[in-house]
Amino acid sequence: MVFPEFDPVLINIGPLFGIGPLPIRWYALAYVAGLGLGWWYAARLIKAPAAWAPNRPPLNALQLDDLIMWVALGVIGGGRLGYALFYKPELYAQLFTGPDNLALLKLWDGGMSFHGGLIGVCLAIFLHSRSIKAPLLSVGDLVAPAVPIGLFFGRMANFINGELWGRTTDVPWGVRFCNQMIMDAYGFCPAGDVPRHPSQLYEAALEGLLLFAILWFAVWKWRLLSKPGYATGIFLLGYGLSRAILETVREPDAHMPEALQGTVTMGMLLSIPMILIGAWLIHRARSRPPVVAPAEA
């Protein structure tokens, strides 16, 4: 299967105020869709007190609005800083030595890390919860069911961009990530003109659709929001396992030590703490009775 002639830029707007053209990219729209729909879903959870019983939702609507601002900063800032830390540490060195001192800030050049974004979101949740004295784990349980929405759109945008492709394969659905648009952009096809696993679509299905469905059952059918940390644990464990498994069909990281290339990837290593923390949170929540919120004054 030949990769379709997708254009990473949906539309060019401009010039605006003497600046332009301004490209509107599918990847940017994926962030907007993920945050917007995640916000809507979390607001729906707040409006369903029965899902939290005998507890109460940890935030009200105004507090959720504030949290989304913190989360957006955590996703973008953490994603970029994490990408540089885990995959391209030379971007930090360039801040002081050049040749491009602002390379770390050039989000439009690509390069975001989910695990870095996750750390940023966790920090945002911690700081916001602490500032309003909200229960940390319950706030995490409010955010966790919505995260797969953003993961789905992000992985679909990765596919449209023709990036983060899988390993070479002979399966019938293998994709040749090489077309005229990629040739025009790079002068060659970085993935080569060979069939590869469309690992972006695998991740959209597992980390996005399947994990969302599991968390939907956890929230609406199994009523696990009554046990703080349970939904967060399911997300961390589910994503960590999915990512570790799918790393076996993703193209290996070129920067890993030679002895580990082809067997262990950075994605696998970063998923191990998620799996361990997720399993611990699930065990902790299962071993404790539902939290009963104090009566309002």
Image: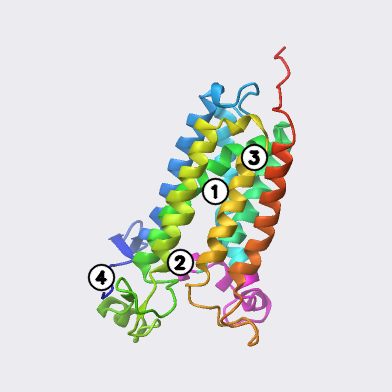
Residue pointed to by mark 1: 72
Secondary-structure class at tag 3 = helix
Q: Quadrant of the C terminus?
A: top right
Disc 4 or disc 1, which is closer to the eye?
4
Disc 2 or disc 1, which is closer to the eye?
1
Residue pointed to by mark 3: 230
Quarter-of-image position of residue 102: bottom right
Residue pointed to by mark 2: 108
Distance between mark 2 and mark 3 Cα atoms: 36 Å
Q: Disc 1 marks which amino acid?
A: Ala
Distance between mark 3 and mark 1 Cα atoms: 23 Å
Give coordinates of residue 142: x percent, y percent.
58, 37
Q: Which of these two is toward me, 58 or 264?
A: 264
Q: Which mark is residue 4?
A: 4
Q: Earlier in the sequence, mark 3 or mark 4?
A: 4
Report if residue 153 is visible in the image: yes
Distance between mark 4 and mark 2 Cα atoms: 22 Å
Secondary-structure class at tag 4 = loop
Dots 2 and 1: beta carbons under 8 Å? Answer: no
Q: Earlier in the sequence, mark 2 or mark 1?
A: 1
Q: Which of these two is toward me, 141 or 36?
A: 141
**Which residues are the magenta region?**
84-110
